[in-house]
Image (cartoon, coloured by chain):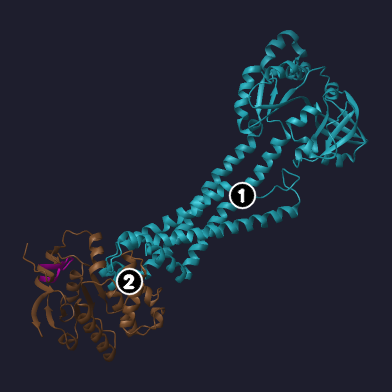
Chain colours: A brown, B cyan
């Protein structure tokens, strides 16, 4: 097993992902990458370059065809679906382009959902959910349903939900793609603030160059390969 | 939250009202049919059995009919051409029980036996003026008979306990047809011509058309005179403690007495057979109801789950396990089925009342001059409960399983 430092959150060793079919698609090819705790990085690349596949593999939503993926020093390929689900619940937060909130539930309930799934019932959870919602500027929208909120507000609820279980890493897939520029900037600033205060790792998948350039580290993928790995600060 | 699956399922139920209503209605209509159809039919049957059981002894001991045909060669040998004339008498005499008091003494300690009543019973005529009606004339010892059958409770005018040698008690319908009432006199004629003038001292109504129109009661002694039986009887009626042990007790009585003993079950075999046939048909109908309800619910569930695939994906990305996703939809189906059951039970009750109203306005039924008490069949109410659970689980298990197996990436990208 490769030497993994305590500060390492994620380590990818020779990861490949091939979608079988009439014409096999090599979505990821020989990816080697190490991501440290507390990093704020962006994965960029043109459409179809493999960046979303990368996020799904990193987020344990999809399994690589070959290679090894270490999370907090543990190799994940032997984990069954149940273990992966538990790990996602505990350590990973997702933010998608479309907010994907549950429309039947209020903002507060949506934020609480990850803690419901981990079967935590304490009042402390509710207080935490309210606090996060207040931090993302929705202190007065606890009991509003997604249909009663704007796109930007819904995306903030989705961010709050991703933070609920205090994960080690937050994945954001085109998080500002559906928002106007002003709102997009606000959301980005919010990510930075959370990264600074809570120390969570942020991995943002985006095709927006401006947004990517604001990240501390930019990884560019083309045709399933890492072609650039730059640190800005 | 310990059971977030329940929380999500119930929220889906209340938020997706249209689907919830369709599923609930489909199941509740099924439930109400499953309860309603057997309930009204079994009410008829139960009523018929109750009345038949109450108006006749649970077990009847008679001397086995030694048919003339069986003995014909023997008789032919002795009597030659005259056998035809003898036929009726041979049959009748063969059926009489001479030593009925001894037999009663012999069997009185048999377990289950509560009361015994010897009787004579044959067909004859009841005549009033020019009106002449065929009737089943039953000669009884009133003090014993009232312990064996419910006749005393069926008396609507007069009484039966003090039925004397010159008295008669008859059914309401027969009394109406003969235009007689208490105190009037009628003439009763037996099959061999003996007749007797008797005073009407009681009128009964059992609710069974056959009894109320054709049955009359006279004192045992009168019956024996009318039928020229001397001191013989035709049979002994027996009441037992548990009517469902009648077959068993009858078997024991056959063994002890060597006579024929028939239980009410054999006596009412036709009704009981009819009930079993009815149950078979109902089972088939219920299967069709379950099948049609289940298929409509399945299609609603497939649509519901398809519309929720993104949400299923997001729940799974947050760590919801396959079993939890499946549970959300199963709980939804089960909770709707419970609601549907309560509603269906209510519908069934309304349908039964509505049907009872129709029957009541008709005034009488084919078998009965009284309206049976229509009530929900507990047996089918319990069956319907399991039906509603079974249907909802059957209808939702495959779509729920498919939901659970959804790949979160594919579900989210939809």
**Vertical order, B115 against B343 (above or below):** above
B308 left or right, relative to B154: left
Task: Indicate the secondary structure of the residue bearing disc 1.
Answer: helix
The residue tagged 1 is B39
Q: Residue furthest bottom?
A: A182
Q: Chain for mark 1? A: B
Residue B41 placement (x, y as % from top left): 63, 47
Identify the residue at image location x=17%, y=73%: A54
Q: Quadrant of residue B409?
A: bottom left
Where disc 2 sits, the SS reads helix
| Side of A228 where A212 appears, left or right | right
For the point 31% across and 83% down, which residue is it?
A136
Q: Nearer the viewer, residue A4 or B381?
A: A4
With respect to residue A114, does A196 lie above or below? below
User: Residue B169: x, y in percent?
Assistant: 84, 34
The C terminus of chain A lies in quadrant: bottom left
Mark 2 lies on residue? B310
State which quarter of the image contains the N terminus of chain A. Answer: bottom left
Give the camera-side residue of A182 and A14: A182
Q: Main secondary structure of the magenta part?
A: strand
Q: Nearer the viewer, residue A62 or B213?
A: A62
Q: Which residues are magenta?
A: A14-29
Tell me the number on the disc at residue A227.
none
The magenta stretch spans residue B189 = no
Q: Residue B304: percent from the left, percent from the top?
A: 40, 67
| Residue B228 visible, this angle | yes
């Amino acid at each position: 097993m490769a030497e993994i430092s305590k500060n390492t959150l994620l380590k990818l060793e020779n990861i490949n992902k091939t979608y079988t079919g009439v014409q096999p698609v090599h979505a990821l090819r020989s990816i080697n990458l190490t991501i440290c705790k507390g990093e704020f990085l962006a994965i960029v690349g043109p459409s179809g370059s493999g960046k979303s596949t990368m996020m799904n593999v990193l987020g344990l939503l999809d399994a690589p065809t070959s290679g090894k993926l270490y999370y907090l020093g543990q190799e994940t390929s032997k984990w069954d679906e149940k273990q992966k689900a538990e790990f996602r619940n505990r350590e990973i937060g997702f933010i998608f382009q479309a907010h994907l909130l549950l429309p039947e539930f209020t903002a507060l309930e949506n934020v609480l959902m990850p803690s419901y799934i981990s079967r935590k019932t304490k009042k402390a959870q509710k207080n935490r959910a309210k606090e996060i919602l207040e931090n993302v500027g929705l202190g007065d929208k606890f009991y509003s349903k997604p249909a009663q909120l704007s796109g930007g507000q819904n995306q903030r609820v989705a961010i709050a939900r991703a933070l609920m279980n205090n994960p080690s890493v937050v994945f954001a897939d085109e998080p500002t793609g559906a928002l106007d520029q002003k709102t997009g900037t606000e959301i980005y600033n919010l990510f930075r603030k959370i990264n600074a205060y809570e120390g969570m790792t942020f991995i943002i998948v985006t095709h927006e160059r401006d947004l990517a350039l604001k990240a501390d580290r930019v990884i560019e993928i083309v045709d399933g390969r890492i072609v650039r790995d730059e640190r800005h600060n | 939250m310990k059971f977030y699956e329940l929380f999500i399922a119930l929220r889906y139920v209340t938020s997706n009202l249209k689907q919830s209503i369709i599923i609930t209605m489909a199941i509740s209509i099924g439930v109400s049919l499953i309860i309603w159809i057997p309930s009204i039919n079994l009410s008829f049957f139960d009523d018929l059995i109750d009345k038949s059981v109450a108006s006749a002894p649970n077990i009847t001991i008679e001397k086995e009919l030694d048919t003339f045909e069986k003995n014909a060669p023997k008789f032919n040998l002795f009597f030659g051409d005259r056998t035809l004339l003898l036929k009726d008498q041979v049959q009748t005499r063969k059926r009489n029980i001479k030593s009925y008091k001894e037999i009663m003494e012999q069997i009185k300690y048999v377990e289950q036996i509560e009361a015994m009543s010897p009787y004579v019973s044959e067909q004859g005529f009841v005549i009033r003026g020019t009106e002449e009606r065929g009737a089943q004339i039953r000669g009884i010892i009133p003090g014993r008979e009232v312990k064996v059958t419910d006749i005393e409770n069926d008396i609507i005018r007069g009484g039966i306990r003090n039925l004397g040698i010159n008295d008669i008690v008859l059914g309401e319908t027969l009394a109406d047809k003969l235009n007689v009432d208490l105190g009037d006199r009628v003439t009763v004629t037996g099959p061999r011509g003996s007749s007797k003038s008797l005073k009407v001292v009681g009128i009964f109504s059992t609710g069974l058309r056959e009894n109320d129109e054709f049955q009359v009661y006279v004192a045992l002694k009168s019956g024996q005179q009318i039928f020229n039986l001397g001191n013989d009887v035709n049979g002994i009626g027996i009441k037992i403690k548990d009517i469902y042990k009648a077959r068993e007790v009858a078997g024991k009585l056959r063994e002890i007495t060597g006579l024929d003993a028939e239980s009410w079950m054999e006596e009412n075999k036709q009704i009981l057979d009819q009930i079993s046939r009815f149950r078979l048909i109902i089972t088939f109908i219920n299967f069709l109801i379950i099948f049609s309800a289940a298929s409509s619910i399945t299609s609603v569930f497939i649509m519901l789950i398809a519309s929720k695939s993104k949400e299923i994906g997001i729940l799974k990305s947050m760590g919801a396990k396959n079993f939890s996703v499946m549970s959300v939809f199963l709980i939804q189906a089960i909770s709707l089925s419970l609601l549907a059951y309560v509603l269906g039970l209510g519908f069934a009750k309304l349908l039964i009342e509505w049907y009872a109203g129709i029957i009541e306005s008709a005034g009488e039924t084919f078998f009965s001059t009284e309206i049976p008490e229509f009530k929900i069949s507990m047996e089918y109410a319990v069956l319907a409960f399991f039906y509603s659970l079974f249907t909802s689980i059957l209808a939702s298990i495959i779509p729920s399983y498919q939901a659970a197996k959804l790949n979160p990436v594919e579900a989210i990208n939809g």
